[in-house]
Amino acid sequence: MGNAISSCFSKYATFSGRATRSEFWYFYLFYAIMYVVGMVVAAAVGTPALMYLFILPLWIPNLAAGIRRMHDVGRSGWFILVPIYNIVLLCTASTPGSNQYGD
């Protein structure tokens, strides 16, 4: 899990290339945990806007990991915008070997 998180942060705004299924889902789990932590801290302090300090810095790497995940299954990154179908693609196994988006 640590490798997936560090990989996503090292490719902070890299929208090209590929991301494995585990890399995406581990980072998404980290994003969800930070969202909950942000909600708890914001509720404890009484400032709802404080939650955004926890999730806004993670929004771009989460989007970039999702787009790289779409590339890993051989689809354009724009498929991240298609409801329901994008969840199916995010759970689909990787395209073996290289594809038009990389190795």
Image (spheres, helix red, strand yellow):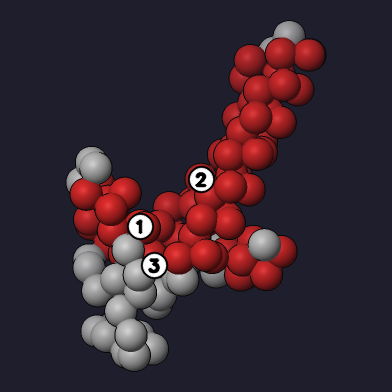
Name the front one of labels 2 and 1.
1
Work out how far the residue at label 2 is from the one at label 3, CA to CA, in angstroms. 14 Å
- The numbered mark, 1 or 3, whose residue comes first in the sequence reads 3
- The circle drawn on residue 68 is 3
Residue type of the residue flagged with mark 2: Trp
Name the front one of labels 2 and 3.
3
- The numbered mark, 2 or 3, whose residue comes first in the sequence reads 2
Q: Which residue is mark 1?
A: 90
Q: Are marks 2 and 3 in contact (CB under 8 Å)?
A: no
Name above or below for residue 79 compared with residue 15.
above
Q: Secondary structure at mark 1?
A: helix
Percent x, y of residue 64: 44, 59
Q: How many numbered marks does the figure carry?
A: 3
Work out how far the residue at label 1 is from the one at label 3, CA to CA, in angstroms. 10 Å
Q: Which residue is mark 2?
A: 59
- Label 1: few (<14), some (14–19) or many (≥20) C-alpha neighbours in 10 Å: many
Work out how far the residue at label 2 is from the one at label 1, CA to CA, in angstroms. 17 Å
Residue type of the residue flagged with mark 3: Arg
